[in-house]
Image (tube, grey):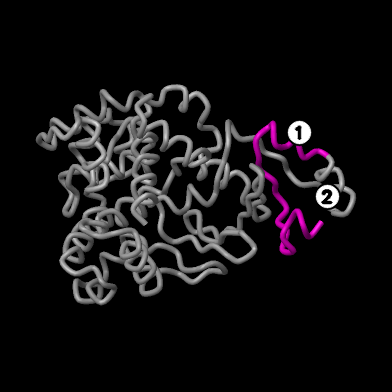
Amino acid sequence: MSAIFPSHEPDVLVGTEASLQKRGDQFRLLLQVKTRIPILLTAAGPISLDLTLLCGQVFHWDRHADGSWTGLIGETPVRVFEKNGVLQVTKGAASLAKNYFALDHPLEEIYAAFPTDPMSVEALALCRGLRIIRQPRWECLATFITSSMKQVAHIRSMSLALRRSFGRPTKYGHTYPSPAMLAASNEDALRACGLGYRAKNLLATSRLVARGAVDLDGLAGLETPALREALVKLPGVGVKVANCVLLFAYERLDAVPIDVWIHRVLISMRRGRGGTASQLSQYARKKLGPYAGYVQQYLFHRARVLTK
């Protein structure tokens, strides 16, 4: 068993129907040696934890030598392990994990809608199993406010510093501080977490949310253009950050955040022709199709991998 599952074996298994059938013998053996029958959850298509958690959409998860990951889904500490398309999740966190990792997203259907240009085809081959996570709305918004002009490693550093300074300690790290926690702080305290000029914006937005001037859950009922317009009114939120929040927190899978990486990709797709931000955004939505947000994330990860 040690060759198949880690020694800290959680109680919940998550996988695709095909992988569960393929590994039926291992599951029968597992049921014979465990006193509690694992809950089996199926995913609509492949799942890759490494790709999903390393592609620049979340920044607080830790990978361990045995291949497992630990982190928080909201305020719930979770350990998750993936091998051959099967996930094992901390007992009691099955429904959280199923929603968070978007196991209901029909990846094969999404893949069928991918563009057929060479870069998109290569990105798909490289990133199969990467899923767009459903992030907690405040955590996502606040994190991407701090992301301006920063690379993934720097965003992670700031996120962890904010968690350690203002969050609640748990088994697997600190929770992300609530709007009220940050609203009660000050700019100097946020700057001490490495935020620089971003501290002022995060503080201002946290105070708006904390006093109820902005209802992030209430905004979910808006159509995408209206939701984007509402988000860009918040301090520290431009179009790029708004599109990140649309994609990762509001599940608007056609939203395309255009950062420096995707800007280069789009210029290459246009054979070197530039354009305004509005023109590139319009081109991206048309070129990348109905799941443009997924295509964008695959292209983003491809670009980062190929430059390392």
Percent of width and height locating residue 200: 16, 64
- Quarter holding the N terminus is bottom right
Give the magenta range: 1-24
Query: What's the residue type where badge 1 is placed?
Result: Gln
Percent of width and height locating residue 82: 63, 50
Q: Say the numbered circle drawn on residue 273.
A: none
Percent of width and height locating residue 127: 47, 41
- Determine the residue located farthest toward the left in the rendered image: 276
Q: CA distance from mark 1 to mark 2?
A: 14 Å
Residue under circle 2?
Answer: 30
**Is 12 in the magenta?**
yes
Q: Is residue 269 above or below residue 10?
A: above
Question: Going by the image, does 106 lie left or right of 17?
Answer: left
Assess whether mark 2 and mark 1 are in contact (beta carbons under 8 angstroms). Answer: no
- Which residue is found at the position 31% from the left and 65% from the top? 154
Q: Residues within 10 Å of mark 1 (few under 14, many from 20)?
A: few
Callout count: 2
Residue under circle 1?
Answer: 21
Query: What's the residue type where badge 2 is placed?
Result: Leu
**Secondary structure at numbered mark 1:** helix
- Which residue is found at the position 54% from the left and 67% from the top? 172
